[in-house]
Image: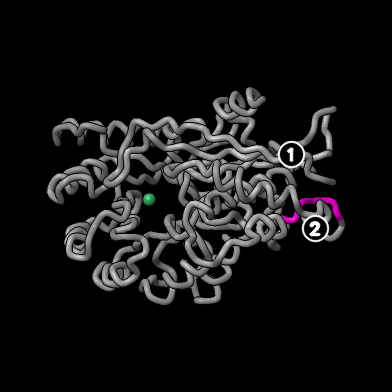
Amino acid sequence: MRILEIRERTVPLEGGVANAVIDFSGHTVSLVAIVCDRKRCGRPIVGYGFNSIGRHGQSGILRDRMIPRLRAADPSSLLDGEGRYLDPAAISSTAMRNEKPGGHGDRAGALGALELAVWDLNAKLDDEPAYRTIARAFGRSTGRRSASVYAAGGYYAPGGSDSESESSRLRAELAHFRALGFEAFKIKIGGATLDRDLVRVEAALEEAGAGSRLAVDANGRFDRTRALEYARALAPFGLRWFEEPGDPLDYQLNHAVAEAYAGPIATGENLFSAIDVANLLRYGGMRPGRDVFQMDPGLAYGLTEYVRMIESLEANGFDRRQCFPHGGHLINLHVAVGLDLGGCEAYPGVFQPFGGYPAECDVGAGRVWPTDAPGFGLEQKTELRRIISDWP
Ligand code: MG
C-alpha cells in the first residue's frame, strides 16, 4: 500500500447567516484527497477529509508544509505494522515535522483535514463505514448504532430584523427542524441586547417545549460582567446548555460562569489541542457529569489528537458522553458513533456542501443513523459528490 498523491482544494462555504461574532459568508473549507495504489472496481481508492464548518481553508499550510513532508517521507514509515493501512499517528507526526509546540491555530485545522482523510481511506480499504474503523481502532463496539443529534440554527439574519418578525422566524425555523425529526435545538445569543435575546429564547422555548431541549450559544462574545449577567437571566429557563459565554481561552471567565450558573455550560470548539483541553480542565471549572465539551477533530489535528483529549477527560473524572463535537457534518457523526460520545449537531439546510447529512441517513426521534457507505460516506452528499467528481 502506498500513497500516490495528496491533493487539497479550498471550497467556499454557502453562508448567508451570522452569529454574535461572525458572518459566515466569507468562510471556506479545505478538502483533502489521499489517492492510494489500491483499486476498487478498477478505480483508485481515495480518502477524503475536511477541516470543519465556520472557519477558513488551510491551503498554504497543506501545500507548502504538510504535504511536502509526507511526500519526502519513506512510504513504509506512514503505514501500520502490517503495511495494510495508513497509520494516522505516523501521518500526523510526519506532517508536523519541524513545527514548534504551542500556537495551535490554523495549523491544527490543516492537519485535521489531512488526518481525517486517512480514516476515510482506511475505512474504504475494508469497504466499511468509518465509525466501525474508528470503533475498532479504539476498542469500542463495532455494532451498528446511532448518535443523539440536535439541530443548530437560530442565527441572526444579516442586516437584522425587528423583534416580532425575529421571534416568528425562530419559531418557524424550530418547527421545521422538528418536522425533520430533531427534538433538541440550539440558537445563537449575544448578537443583540439581553432583553431582545430573552425574547428570542422565549420564542424558541415555545417551539422547543422545554428548556432541556434548547441550548443557547454566545460564540465567546461576552466579557465577564456580561457573561454573568446572561447567566443570571438564563438560569430560570433550565436550558440544555449555555455555550461559550466568553473567550474560549479565558478559563477564569469560564470558571466564574460555572460557579454562578447551575445549568450545564458548553465549550471547547475553539480549543485545538490536547494541552488546551488539559488547561480547560485545570482552570476552567468544568463539572463532571454536567458540562459539555465540543472539541472538533477537524479543527484540532484530527482524530489522533481528539482521542488524547477524551483520555484526558476520562482521567479527570469526566464521561465521554459529555462530548458533543462541534460541526454538524458526516465526519463528526462517525466520530460520535464510533467513540460512543454524547452526540453530535446538525445544521439543516445551511453550510453546504459540507453541513448536514444525506437523505440516506435516517433522522428521527432525536437520533441520526450513519449509513453503511464506505468511509465517512461523503460521496452520498449530492453537493459534495459534485465537487469530488469535478476535481481534475
Ligand atoms: Mg458554538
**Label 1 crowd (10 A; few <14 / some 14-19 / many >=20):** some
Q: Mark 2: is the Cβ under 8 angstroms from ligand 1?
A: no
Whether residues under marks 1 and 2 lie with C-beta atoms below 8 angstroms apart, the answer is no
Which residue is painted at 54% across and 40% down in the image?
30
Could you say which quadrant of the image residue 249 lies in?
bottom left
Question: Which mark sits nearer the N-terminus, 1 or 2?
Answer: 1
Q: How is the image coloured?
A: one colour
Classify mark 2: helix, strand or loop.
helix
Q: Which residue is drawn at 64% across and 26% down?
A: 391
Q: Position of residue 159 (x, y in %)?
A: 21, 32
Counting from the top left corner in percent of width and height, residue 354 is at: 52, 35
Point out the stretch of residues depicted in magenta.
83-87
Residue position for label 1: 5
Q: Residue 77 carries which label?
A: 2
What label does residue 99 carry, if any?
none
Please name the residue shown 63% across and 50% down the image: 66
Name which residue type carries label 1: Glu
